[in-house]
């Protein structure tokens, strides 16, 4: 069961519990509620693991983007060296090599920016989910604290 389902179940148990008329209090099964809270605590690390996985994937994407950029630049340099060997084509080779390097740098920059944006969106979504879960947990804890009296 995921955390949100457990919180829904916890809410159902509280809402469906017997209540004391005019007191705004309810009789709840303490063991059942504590078991649900325990299960929520067990499930939360999975959400944190997912966030860490996204962070690791972000690093992999950035590393791959940098490797692609390095490969493009290396290919451009190799191409330049081949062109320089031919005397009559030296000027043309110089111009072409600058274009290739410029294109390679632009491509590398686009890949890095795309990878960062994608990773930022993933982390933003995860952060929002975690914030919503924490807010819900805090709200439910406050409701539970209000029921103790």
Image (cartoon, rainbow, N blue to C red):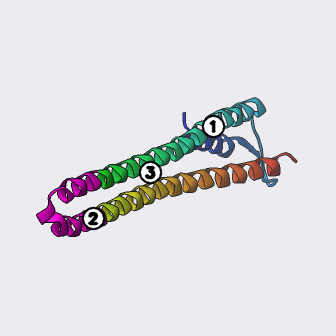
Sequence-first tag of 2 and 1? 1
The residue positioned 32% from the left and 49% from the top of the image is 71
Residue for badge 1 = 45
**Residue 137 in the image: x percent, y percent?**
68, 48
Is disc 1 in contact with disc 3, using a CB cutoff of under 8 Å? no
Q: Toward the viewer: 99 or 30?
A: 99
Say above or below: 10 vs 87: above
Residue for badge 3 = 62
Residue 35 sits inside the magenta stretch: no
Using the numbered discs, state the Cα–Cα distance from disc 1 to disc 3 in whole angstroms: 26 Å
Residue for badge 2 = 103
At label 3, counting other C-alpha atoms closer than 10 Å, the crowd grade (few under 14, some 14-19, many 20 or more) is some
Can residue 115 be seen here? The reply is: yes
Using the numbered discs, state the Cα–Cα distance from disc 2 to disc 1 in whole angstroms: 44 Å
**Residue 57 in the image: x percent, y percent?**
47, 44
Q: Which structural element holds mark 2?
A: helix
């Amino acid at each position: 069961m995921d955390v949100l389902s457990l919180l829904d179940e916890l809410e159902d148990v509280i809402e469906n519990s017997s209540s004391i008329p005019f007191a705004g209090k309810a009789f709840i099964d303490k063991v059942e509620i504590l078991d649900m809270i325990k299960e929520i605590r067990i499930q939360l690390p999975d959400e944190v693991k997912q966030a860490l996985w996204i962070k690791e994937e972000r690093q992999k994407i950035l590393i791959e983007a940098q490797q692609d950029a390095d490969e493009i630049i290396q290919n451009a340099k190799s191409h330049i060296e081949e062109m320089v060997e031919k005397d009559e084509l030296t000027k043309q080779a110089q111009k072409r090599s600058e274009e290739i390097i410029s294109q390679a740098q632009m491509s590398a920059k686009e890949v890095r920016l795309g990878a960062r944006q994608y990773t930022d969106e993933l982390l933003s979504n995860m952060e929002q989910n975690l914030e919503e879960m924490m807010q819900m947990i805090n709200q439910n804890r406050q409701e539970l604290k209000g029921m103790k009296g």
